[in-house]
Image: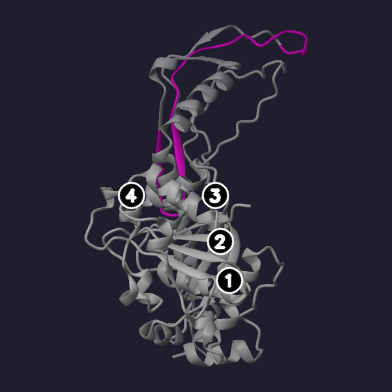
Amino acid sequence: MIEWLKKFLGTPPSSSTAKERLRLVLMTDHLALAPEIIENMKRDLVDVISRYVEVDREKLEIEFEREDRALALMASIPIISVNRPSGGDGEKPAVKERVEDAQTAAVPGSAAPSVNATPGEPPKRRRRKKTSSKPATAH
Amino acid sequence: MSGRRIVITSGKGGVGKTTTTANLGAALAKRGARVILVDADIGLRNLDLVLGLEKRIVFDVVEVAEGRCQLRQALIKDKRFESLSILPAAQTRDKDAINEEQFAAIVAQAAEQADFVLIDCPAGIEAGFRNAIAGAKEAIVVTTPEVSAIRDADRVVGKLNEKQLPIRLIVNRLRPAMVKAGDMLSVDDVCEILAVELLGIVPDDEEIIDTTNRGEPIVLDETAKLRVIYDKIARRMEGELVPFTNFDAQGLFGRLFGALKAG
């Protein structure tokens, strides 16, 4: 009866609220307790992104933001220049282009982010890295 | 062969560590295992009281550590179970009256004469916790299905992982009717959040308060529903594969608990 009333009224059951809140707070706790994770992640992120664009390692910033229902990883990675794509893929060779404003790449966050990149693959042509500001939900 | 050394811990206080230690110890002893329960809560001794042995204390764990007495002199035999003894904590000393090495040595010595040494860990993650886990080879984490208890349990799981202790979980004071109504985290939720193997589910029941009031282990109460629960957990600790009670099922058990907890 109570169950039915709650469904009828559309209030989410408090257990799901509890689960969601715990999930977030534990992710935050785990990150706070393991600063080396963040350092390693910074290094790996830069390594991967550097295959495509030249970035300023010194000015890299990473932070975690608690949003309403998600924990987001916000990475600010200033791009110095964009590499010339390797030839042979039929594309016109791009001029190495200077990016005037430091671009911000937002990386979808998760407690243990995995960045997909196949080593040895020719870098894809990227003229300009667009700023994507909408963080993905962390799982 | 040396017995198993298991710390029973939770991080948060008041979730039922001591009650769990006492009743699991009694359940194992009832099944014939030789059990020594060690109270690691120096200054806040309670295991003796829960088991009704408070009047028989002569020496305590700190006095053993200081060499003032032998371990066997400090052990209190439970008259109801030939194979159950407890090593009481000191009540008038501080946590730092004993260190990790001393504690580990005492637990190791106890394990030579028992099948199970269960260590009742104090709340918190400071010195008392470090002492309690120092001599342990396995851990049982006790939690209730509440956000604060689970967060603290998670912290403790992290600490135990650092020590590479195998961990199993007891979800204590579950109210199946509330879970069914969506007002309490389910056992599955808790296991998923903590990512720890489940050892037992103990429903919330007033009868444990009653037996604890009397200083009697619940496994001795033939009418107690929880008796079966603790016996099952004891069997799982011994390595038996015992299916978990499904509290959602509308069996006699489910209906009984449902009726009790609906209000």
The three-letter code of the residue at mark 4 reads Gly
Asked which secondary structure carries label 3, the reply is: loop
Q: Earlier in the sequence, mark 1 or mark 4?
A: 1
Q: Earlier in the sequence, mark 1 or mark 3?
A: 1
Asked which secondary structure carries label 2, the reply is: strand
**Residue where numbered disc 2 is placed:** B116
From this view, report whether residue B61 is shown above or below residue A30: below
The three-letter code of the residue at mark 1 reads Leu
- Would residue A22 be counted in the magenta stretch? no
Q: Earlier in the sequence, mark 3 or mark 4?
A: 4
**Residue where numbered disc 1 is placed:** B28
Mark 2 burial class by Cα count in 10 Å: few <14, some 14-19, many 20+: many
> Residue B44: image x %, image y %?
28, 64
Q: Are the residues flagged by discs 2 and 4 in contact, CB closer than 8 Å?
A: no
Total label count? 4
Residue drawn 35% across and 57% down?
A: B61
Q: Are the residues flagged by discs 2 and 1 in contact, CB closer than 8 Å?
A: yes
Res A126 → quadrant: top right
Residue B67: mark in rendering: 4
The three-letter code of the residue at mark 2 reads Phe
Q: Give how far apart the Cα atoms at labels 1 and 3 are.
A: 18 Å
- Report if residue A20 is visible in the image: yes
Chain of the residue under label 2? B
From this view, report whether residue A70 is shown above or below residue A115: below
Q: Nearer the viewer, mark 2 or mark 4?
A: 4
Q: Are marks 3 and 2 on the same chain?
A: yes
Chain of the residue under label 4? B
Q: Which residues are magenta?
A: A63-91
Q: Is residue B142 left or right of residue B64?
A: right
**Residue where numbered disc 3 is placed:** B137
Q: Earlier in the sequence, mark 2 or mark 4?
A: 4
Asked which secondary structure carries label 4, the reply is: loop
